[in-house]
Structures are given as C-alpha cells and as structure tokens.
C-alpha cells in the first residue's frame, strides 16, 4: 500500500513539475515576444562635411536586432521639414532604417517659393558641395548600427527627386532610387553603364513643370546609358501629388500643386516593389 502511495505522490510531483516548467517557458516566450515588438523611433542627428553642418532625422525600429536596408529621404525644395520626416517614419514601418537628409545645411527651410528656388540654385550651382553633402549623408546612414551597408536606397520628392536621380547618374553606390514629382533636367547626365541603381520615377502626366520634351529626353538618356528604370505617368496628377498639403500651398502661392490620393497610394506601392527587387538580389 505504501509503495502505491509513494508512486502516486511521485506521479503528482512529476506532473506538477512539468506544468511549472511549461508555465515558465510560456512566460519566457511571452516576455521575449514583448521585447521584440516593434518600437519605432525618430531621432534627430547632426552630421557635417568640411564646410557644412546638417540636421538629419533617423527613423527605425529600436527593437529590431537584424541589420536592415538603409534609405535616404531627400526633401522637396522647401527643405528638411515634417513631410520628409513623415516619409522616413513610413519607411521605418516597412522595415527599413531611413535618414531624412538636410541638403541646405543647418536645417534651413523656405517659407516662400522665391526662397526655395534660391536654396535649390545654391545646391545645383555647386555640384561638388552638393555631392559632398549627399555622400556624407550616405556615410552616416551606412554607419547606423541597424543598417546593412551593402543595401542602400534613396528616394526624393520634387527637388529631392532631381538630386537623387543626379546622384544615381553620377554612379553613386545605390541599389535603388525612386523620384516623385521630380524635375528631369538633371545637372548630371549618365554615362553608358554608369547607373548602378534600379530607377523608379513617378510623375504627374498633367504637371506643367515637367513638359513632355523633358520626359522624352530623360528616357533617351536612360536608354542610352543602359539603365534599368521605370517611368510612371499618372493621368490627372500634377506637381506635389504625394503631399496632402499641396492644395493649400498651391492656393496660397498660386502654383499648380494638388494632392492626388490614388497616385500617392499607387506610387508608394511601386516603391515597395522596387525595394523588394533591389534589396533581395
């Protein structure tokens, strides 16, 4: 009888022990899952060339332990503002580490189109300095602990698109470049075989700032260089079609700007497919 009692007690002890271990294991698993839940952060930084200090903005998942592709976000002609940061945040949510760059230096922004054009002309008029600023931004992005330095892309809006395409034409070490409502009269033209990046350009078909002859010349230059590119033209879309505040800004300054939700959504989806192709090869 005692042996049977001892056996029952032993069995109960074993069952309780196993249950306790499972409970601990489940708690550990749940804790690990909680620790690895995405936590997206925005982090202001400064970085410098020999002559210019720039104010940037990193967006990333601080709990991600895997090195991810890095993406530069180049602002519209207004300068490094909330819109550029918003796009960096959106890229972080897609699993990238994004750096919204400052091409004007000292975080300068424009409140009027005349001031914006002045900033643009300073950048375009000194390609050595603008290239140095771009290169420093890319160096800063690659040095981020969450970035795989072998997988780098760049996106740009308006002026930023023009600059991103120009850097791609110059042979910058980029896997992918996407330009939205971008000017196509590029200060740097591609050489045959010189464009390393996959290229996506999304523009409005009705954008008076981007005439058809500019589109034809851009396509011809890409074809002659043997570049891998896609040019998308959205019917009914005009300049700044990705920016929700474009209508109010256009009305304020009497400029042909307007948000187009359908074109915005489709162009962002095309960007994601571009990155999937560029970063998985």
Image (cartoon, rainbow, N blue to C red):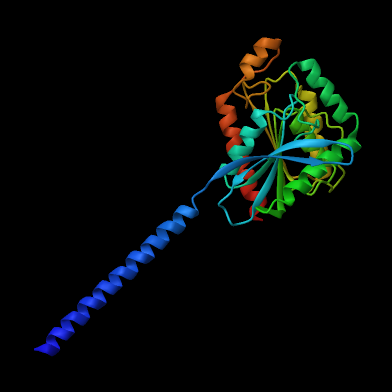
Whether residue 233 is visible to the viewer of this picture, yes or no, is no
Location of residue 137 in the rendering, given as x and y in whole percent from the top left corner: 77, 43
The N terminus: image quadrant: bottom left
The quadrant holding residue 234 is: top right
The quadrant holding residue 215 is: top right
Whether residue 271 is visible to the viewer of this picture, yes or no, is yes
Q: Is residue 233 above or below residue 227?
A: above
Residue located 57% across and 33% down the image:
266
Furthest residue in direction left, as rendered: 1
Q: Please indicate whether residue 129 sits to the left or right of residue 276 in the image.
A: right
> Toward the viewer: 94 or 101?
101
Q: Please indicate whether residue 31 sits to the left or right of residue 119 in the image.
A: left
Residue located 62% across and 25% down the image:
243
Location of residue 245 in the rendering, given as x and y in whole percent from the top left corner: 61, 20
Residue located 49% across and 54% down the image:
35
Number of numbered labels in the structure image: 0
The C terminus: image quadrant: bottom right
Q: Is residue 93 above or below residue 263?
A: below
> Toward the viewer: 109 or 238?
109
Q: Please indicate whether residue 246 sits to the left or right of residue 37 in the image.
A: right
Residue located 67% across and 32% down the image:
84
> Toward the viewer: 57 or 117?
57
Location of residue 229 in the rendering, given as x and y in whole percent from the top left corner: 72, 41
Q: Please indicate whether residue 39 sits to the left or right of residue 162 in the image.
A: left
Furthest residue in direction front, as rendered: 2
Q: Is residue 66 above or below residue 192?
A: below
> Toward the viewer: 125 or 162?
125
């Amino acid at each position: 009888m005692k042996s049977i009692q001892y056996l029952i007690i032993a069995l109960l002890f074993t069952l309780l022990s196993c249950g306790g271990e499972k409970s601990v294991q489940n708690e550990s698993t749940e804790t690990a899952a909680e620790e690895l839940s995405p936590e997206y952060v925005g982090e202001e930084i400064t970085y410098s060339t020999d002559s210019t200090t720039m104010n940037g903005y990193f967006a990333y998942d601080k709990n991600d332990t895997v090195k991810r592709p890095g993406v530069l976000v180049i602002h519209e002609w207004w300068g490094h503002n909330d819109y550029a940061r918003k796009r960096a945040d959106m890229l972080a949510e897609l699993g990238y580490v994004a750096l919204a760059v400052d091409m004007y230096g000292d975080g300068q922004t424009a409140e009027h189109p005349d001031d914006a054009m002045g900033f643009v002309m300073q950048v375009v008029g000194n390609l050595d300095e603008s290239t140095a600023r771009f290169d420093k931004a890319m160096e800063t992005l690659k040095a981020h602990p969450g970035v795989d330095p072998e997988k780098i892309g760049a996106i740009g809006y308006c002026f930023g698109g023009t600059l991103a395409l120009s850097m791609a034409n110059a042979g910058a070490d980029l896997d992918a470049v996407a330009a939205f409502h971008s000017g196509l009269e590029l200060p740097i033209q591609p050489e045959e075989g010189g464009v390393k990046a996959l290229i996506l350009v999304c523009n409005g078909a009705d954008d008076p700032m981007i005439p058809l002859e500019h589109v034809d010349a851009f396509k011809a230059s890409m074809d002659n260089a043997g570049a891998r590119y896609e040019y998308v033209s959205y019917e009914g879309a005009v300049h700044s079609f990705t920016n929700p505040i474009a209508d109010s800004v256009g009305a304020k300054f009497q400029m042909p700007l307007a948000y187009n939700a359908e074109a915005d959504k489709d162009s962002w989806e095309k960007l994601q497919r571009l990155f999937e192709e560029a970063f998985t090869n």
